[in-house]
Amino acid sequence: MTRRYDKYKFCLNILNILLFLLDITLDLLKTLCMETSNYTICYFSDETIPLTDADMETLFTRSSTFNNAHNIYGIFLHIAGKYLQILEGNKEVIDSLYARILEDGRHKNVYEVFNKKTENLIFKEYNSKFSIVKTTDDLVDINDYLESNRYDSRCDKLARLLAPFLMFREA
Ligand SMILES: Cc1cc2nc3c(=O)[nH]c(=O)nc-3n(C[C@H](O)[C@H](O)[C@H](O)COP(=O)(O)O)c2cc1C
């Protein structure tokens, strides 16, 4: 009787260990999936009405605070009535943010340049936080970074997208 009980206890222990290992494996797979479901969204848009400096500053600050708190990388710039934004991060997180951005009445004519899965987060490597591009120097730095990574086709495309903004700033 005791022997059978010991056997039963042994089996239960093995089962517990297996369940524990399964739990760890599932956690690991979940983490891997989260890491591989990174997306990049890039769009241009037109402002609807010009924001005051104070309102623009508020938009920039709120955006970077939210994005940094949610591991969203990328850049946000406003030049000559146009917005350019690149959002990189976990698909679910940036999709729900992007849905809100699309509904925002402060801009219109959103032209999506790309919205696709990405293997590496370009802007996480550039600057480990979300970048608000306010000065010519900021823009030049980003452009230099993209130019130096031109072997990556997305950097090449982004550098080409930034070029007109750079020319505008230099004029
Ligand atoms: C061009 C543009 C870009 C924006 N980008 C961001 C952003 O990157 N992060 C963010 O949190 N809000 C951003 N916003 C603000 C959002 O549209 C929205 O106001 C904010 O997420 C708050 O949403 P809620 O009022 O529904 O909570 C942006 C707004 C505009 C007009």
Image (spheres, helix red, strand yellow):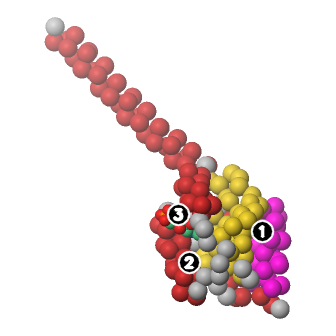
- Closest to the observer, 58 or 131: 58
**Horizontal arrangement in the rendering, residue 75 relative to residue 64 (left or right):** right
**Horizontal arrangement in the rendering, residue 134 relative to residue 64 (left or right):** right
> Could you say whether the residue bearing mark 2 is in a helix, strand or loop?
helix
As shown in the figure, which amino acid type bears the numbered disc 3? Asn
User: Which residue is identified by label 1?
Assistant: 158
- Closest to the observer, 14 or 166: 166
Determine whether 100 is above or below 9 in the image.
Answer: below
Give yes or no for contact between labels 3 and 2 (Cβ–Cβ under 8 Å). Answer: no
Image quadrant, ligand 1: bottom right
User: Which residue is identified by label 3?
Assistant: 71
Residue positioned 72% across, 76% down in the render: 82
Residue 96: say if magenta: no
- Distance, label 3 to label 1, CA atoms, is 21 Å
Looking at the rendered image, the quarter that the N terminus falls into is top left
State the mark number for residue 60: 2
As shown in the figure, which amino acid type bears the numbered disc 1? Leu
Residue positioned 49% across, 68% down in the render: 66
Q: Toward which corner of the image does residue 136 lie, by quadrant? A: bottom right
Q: Toward which corner of the image does residue 141 lie, by quadrant? A: bottom right
Q: Which residues are magenta?
A: 140-168
Residue 150: say if magenta: yes
Mark found first going from the N terminus, 1 or 2: 2
Disc 2 residue crowd, few under 14, some 14–19, many 20+, Cα 10 Å? some
> Could you say whether the residue bearing mark 1 is in a helix, strand or loop?
helix
- Name the residue at the top extreme: 1
